[in-house]
Image: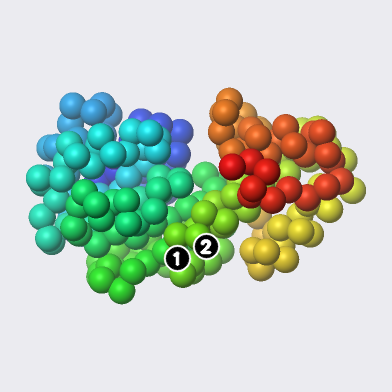
Amino acid sequence: MNIAVIGAQGKFGSKLIERISSIKPTHVSLRGTVDKGHNLELVSWADLIILSVKPNQLMDLLNEIKSDLTNKKQILTFVAGVNISEYENIVSIPITRGMSDPWWNVGGFLIPDNFNKTDIDFIFDKMINQIVILKNDKDIQEFTFLISYLFVVILARKEEFISNDSSNVHISYIQTKLKIQTGDIVLPENSTIKDITTEGGVSKKILDFILRNPNSSITINEVS
């Protein structure tokens, strides 16, 4: 079983490589791209292609690699905001969508019936501590927003941007939606809000909102 991570040089992609390396069985080989020039070589080699690129790069990437996506290959994508139907307009192999925080505390998967987990079940069973199985693209869109919201709040509290009381308001709301145990979440000591926020991104919009409205919960419509 050969697994390729495209986008391995990015923040999330590099963490994917580290995490999969730490849990994969010995018979699984793992490689990640260091630059776009090796995408085709990697896709040709791989059985499972994991995508961790920016949404605005995805369609160009799919068009670049589609000729090498034979029917024995599969895609696991962590690209936010792109529905499976949009992939299917370009490629015709099984596609699963996933999302997680970069410390593998909470994650979700949208796994279609035609996706084969044989030899890669360790990704779905061991990579993420708390897993939510999602039913459709709308579910994963909401889930992506909620875990972004959750970790922005946790890190904003850690850095004392908001009070414990304010963070509890937000976390209580998120828990009712996600139905997870936030008390089990563990972050590295050196983790900061900058790890998950980029200018113009959803997490930055959530942070800006809760700084302006520390005691009011936010919905996905307010950051879309």
- The answer to which quarter of the image holds residue 17 is top left
Residue 101 shown left or right of residue 189 in the figure? left
The circle on residue 106 is: none
**Residue 206 placement (x, y as % from top left):** 68, 39
Residue 25 shown left or right of residue 159 in the figure? left
List the residue tagged with mark 1: 136
Dot 1: what SS? loop
Callout 1 amino acid = Asn
Q: Nearer the viewer, residue 118 or 169?
A: 169
- Picture residue at 54% right of the left edge, 51% below the top: 144
How many marks the image carries: the answer is 2
Dot 2: what SS? helix
Quadrant containing the C terminus is top right
**Residue 102 placement (x, y as % from top left):** 52, 44
**Residue 207 placement (x, y as % from top left):** 71, 35
Contact check, label 1 and label 2, Cβ < 8 Å: yes
Q: CA distance from mark 1 to mark 2?
A: 5 Å
- Picture residue at 89% right of the left edge, 48% below the top: 165
Residue 222 shown left or right of residue 201 in the figure? right
Q: Nearer the viewer, residue 51 or 19?
A: 51
- Picture residue at 38% right of the left edge, 33% below the top: 56
Decide if residue 23 is in sight here: no
Callout 2 amino acid = Asp
Q: Residue furthest bottom?
A: 113
**Label 1 crowding class (10 Å Cα cut-off): few <14, some 14-19, many 20+?**
some
**Label 2 crowding class (10 Å Cα cut-off): few <14, some 14-19, many 20+?**
some
Residue 69 shown left or right of residue 88 in the figure? left
List the residue tagged with mark 2: 139
- Picture residue at 86% right of the left edge, 46% below the top: 215
**Residue 43 placement (x, y as % from top left):** 17, 44
Quadrant containing the N terminus is bottom left
